[in-house]
């Protein structure tokens, strides 16, 4: 029966949505890591010290677009890992990269903690994940990242900037379920993101509003010298809090 109502997200519903996106070839270019992963990696180079980075985790890796860029750049003594809550995505990623000597593994988890051991990662990158988390999941993710990141290890986050959540909702014409088409649950600003991460035990090295635009948008900016006033993305770069020598 058709009855307009707001969705109540559950782990099963979230998994169903992202398993569908993962299997649908037409959706692959909708992943933020596909659109901007390469640009984000270039952006962070000026803020992190590459010395001592041996293990890199893509937290919320999706179908592996960022992992692909990480593996291209990885040195011989570096290993790249992934983590995702979509089983379909994890199967796809492991099938794609398992023969790469710089690839560790990608793990599928239904709930935290993950199987990664304490202080096992030097760099954790999580592109457009934290906007998907509810009030219970958010602190759990931050605690998990803090647990598996080594002292002075780096954390990179991106998320939409001051997103209009209502403007990205749609409705199922069959049952009337109203939901954000990409399962976003919260929006962020520089202030709220910085406060949340510092509360979670991270020192902020850099936070900014920016535009990690899709390729055709970058070409418009390059050739027409047009810079949008609205900065669509946020980036956060932090270190696990401890007395660090950078």
Image (cartoon, helix red, strand yellow):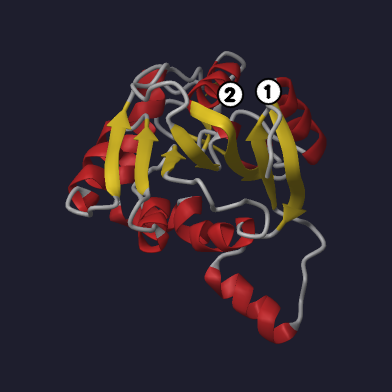
Name the mark on residue 19: none
Task: Report which residue position mark 2 lands on.
Answer: 142
x, y percent for residue 169: 58, 37
Q: Residue at x 61, y 63 (%)?
A: 213
Compared with 213, 219 (above or below) is: below
Compared with 214, 68 (above or below) is: above
x, y percent for residue 175: 42, 25
Task: Report which residue position mark 1 lands on.
Answer: 201
Asked whether the beta carbons under mark 1 and mark 2 sit within 8 Å of each other, the answer is yes
- In the image, 54 versus 57, the foreground residue is 54
Query: As drawn, is 160 to the left or to the right of 20?
Result: right
Query: As drawn, is 156 to the left or to the right of 62?
Result: right
Quarter of the figure with the C terminus: top right
Real-space Cα separation, disc 1 to disc 2, in angstroms: 9 Å
Can residue 4 be seen from the camera position used here?
Answer: no
User: Where is residue 245, by image quadrant?
Assistant: top right
Label 1 residue SS: loop
Q: Residues within 10 Å of mark 2 (few under 14, many from 20)?
A: some
Compared with 12, 43 (above or below) is: below
x, y percent for residue 156: 59, 43
Quarter of the figure with the N terminus: top left
Q: Residues within 10 Å of mark 1 (few under 14, many from 20)?
A: some
């Amino acid at each position: 029966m058709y009855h307009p109502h707001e969705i109540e997200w559950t782990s099963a519903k979230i998994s169903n949505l992202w398993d569908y996106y993962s299997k649908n070839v037409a959706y692959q270019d909708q992943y933020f890591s596909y659109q901007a992963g390469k640009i984000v990696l270039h952006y962070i180079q000026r803020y992190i010290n590459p010395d001592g980075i041996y293990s890199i985790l893509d937290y919320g890796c999706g179908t592996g677009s960022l992992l692909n860029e990480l593996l291209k750049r990885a040195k011989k003594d570096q290993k790249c890992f992934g983590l995702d809550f979509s089983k379909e995505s994890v199967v796809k990623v492991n099938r794609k990269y398992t023969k790469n000597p710089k690839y560790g593994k990608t793990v599928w988890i239904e709930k935290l903690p993950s199987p990664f051991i304490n202080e096992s990662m030097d760099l954790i990158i999580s592109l457009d994940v934290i906007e998907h988390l509810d009030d219970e999941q958010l602190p759990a993710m931050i605690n998990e990242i803090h647990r598996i990141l080594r002292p002075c290890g780096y954390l990179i986050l991106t998320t939409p900037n001051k997103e209009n959540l209502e403007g990205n909702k749609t409705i199922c014409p069959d049952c009337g379920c109203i939901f954000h088409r990409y399962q976003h649950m919260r929006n962020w600003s520089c202030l709220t993101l910085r406060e949340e991460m510092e509360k979670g035990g991270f020192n902020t090295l850099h936070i900014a509003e920016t535009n990690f635009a899709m390729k055709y948008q970058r070409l418009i900016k390059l050739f027409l010298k047009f810079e949008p006033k609205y900065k669509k993305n946020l980036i956060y770069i932090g270190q696990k809090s401890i007395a660090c020598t950078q």
